[in-house]
Every structure is written in structure tokens, then in C-alpha cells.
Image (cartoon, grey):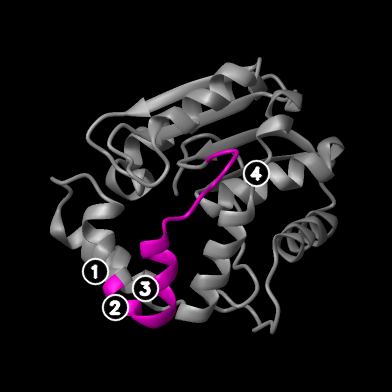
Amino acid sequence: MYLKINYNIIAIDLPSHNKSSVFSVLSLKLYVDVVKDFTKILRSEKIIIGGHSMGGVIAQEFFYNYPEDVSALILCSTGGRMRVSKFILNNVKINYQVYLDSLREGSFYRKTPKNIIDNAILEASQTGSEVTYNDFKICNAFDTLTKTSTIDVPCLIICGKADQMTPVKYSQFFHDKIKNSELYIIDKAGHSVMLEKPKHVNNAIEDFIQKYFNNK
């Protein structure tokens, strides 16, 4: 991600992901604790926390646990409840390649350039099937719909109009329940909206931050 505005952008490798250490047990609490520990290192009073899909789940849970640490939320292609289809859960565990191949249609708009999809699937394949399965189990168990209206910080909601995994109605629910929220629906984009339409996503984030924090 590249933003024109002068803000530090930090992406965390979660436990057992990419270059981070391998953990035997993964949980939403562990992921939230890792983010909390990282904020202590930053010594920042408050952060703007954002996430895509499961990252959005982590961002929400972090807010519910540490609202005093959050100045704003950015929720991209996510939901307050994240049910995962049996097809995904079954194939991630027993036939990982079938799951990876399904991302071509399930996670992208149909006219997304092939090279973007190929690169995304290659990157996804670097995370092992067991870790991915655990992540989907975390998502499947997540349900904080009754808490959504308690979010009282500015919230940017981004989704692809053609998202099949977290449909627009998920984002619309956020917008309806969160008083100080902005909804940005991006045409000709699916679940991987930040890869399909990076300029649109970046512009939405820049506009949001400038609107709420340009004088702070």
C-alpha cells in the first residue's frame, strides 16, 4: 500500500504467517494480543487499525477489547459475522489445491487480469493448509453483530461490488449500525478489492484520513 499522505503504515505478519514464528495453537485472542503488544512497542497513544477479511475480524476484536487505543477503523471486505462455506472448510483441509483454484472465481471479479489472480494465489499458497484452515475456523466462529453499534470511532467501510465471500450486505450492515461511518463500494471488484482496484482503495483511505485527522 502507498498513500500520498504522511502516515506510517505498518503491516504485521501474524503468528505462523510469512516470516513470523510458528505457533502450535492459533486463535483470535492470540492475533489481537500480538497487535496489542506491537502497539506497546510503537508507544503510540492511538492507532487507526484496518484489516481485510480476517484482518477486519482482528481489527473489530481489537477495538472491542482496547477501544481506548483506537482512533479509527478501516474495515475492508469483512463482516460482523463471518460464516465460511463447507466447501472451503473441507477443501482447505483435505485438498488445498482445489481451494486455491477456487479463488479464481470466488475471490475476484470475473474480468480481473490473470496476472493479478496468479500472483495472489501464489502468495496464498505460501501459507500452509493447516494455518489457513485454522484462520477460516476463527472466521467461522466470529459473530459480534450485537456489538457493532457500539463502535463509536470514525469507520471506513470498503467492499467490492462483486464480492461473493463477504457480500455488500455485510458492509451495508456496518454502515447502518455504525453512526460515524462511510461506505465505499467499488465497482468491478470482488473479495480481493485491494488487489483488483488498489488506487480506488488507497484513495478512499486517503480521503477518510484527511477528512477526520488532517488537523491532528
Q: Earlier in the sequence, mark 4 or mark 2?
A: 2
**Residue drawn at 37 percent across, 76 percent down:** 125
Residue at image point 57% right, 26% down: 174
- Between residue 55 and residue 95, name the one nearer to us: 95
Q: Where is residue 113 in the image (x, y as percent from the top left)?
A: 15, 53
Question: Whole-Å distance between the Cαs marked 1 and 4?
Answer: 28 Å
The residue labelled by disc 1 is: 101
Check disc 4 and give the amino acid type: Asp
Range drawn in magenta = 79-98
Residue holding disc 3: 91
* Alpha carbon distance from label 2 to label 3: 8 Å
Under mark 2, the amino acid is Gln
Q: Which of marks 3 and 1 is nearer the N terminus?
A: 3
Residue under numbered circle 4 = 143
Looking at the image, residue 81 lies above or below residue 203: below
Q: CB of mark 1 within 8 Å of CB of mark 2?
A: yes
**Circles 1, 4 touching at the beta carbon (< 8 Å):** no
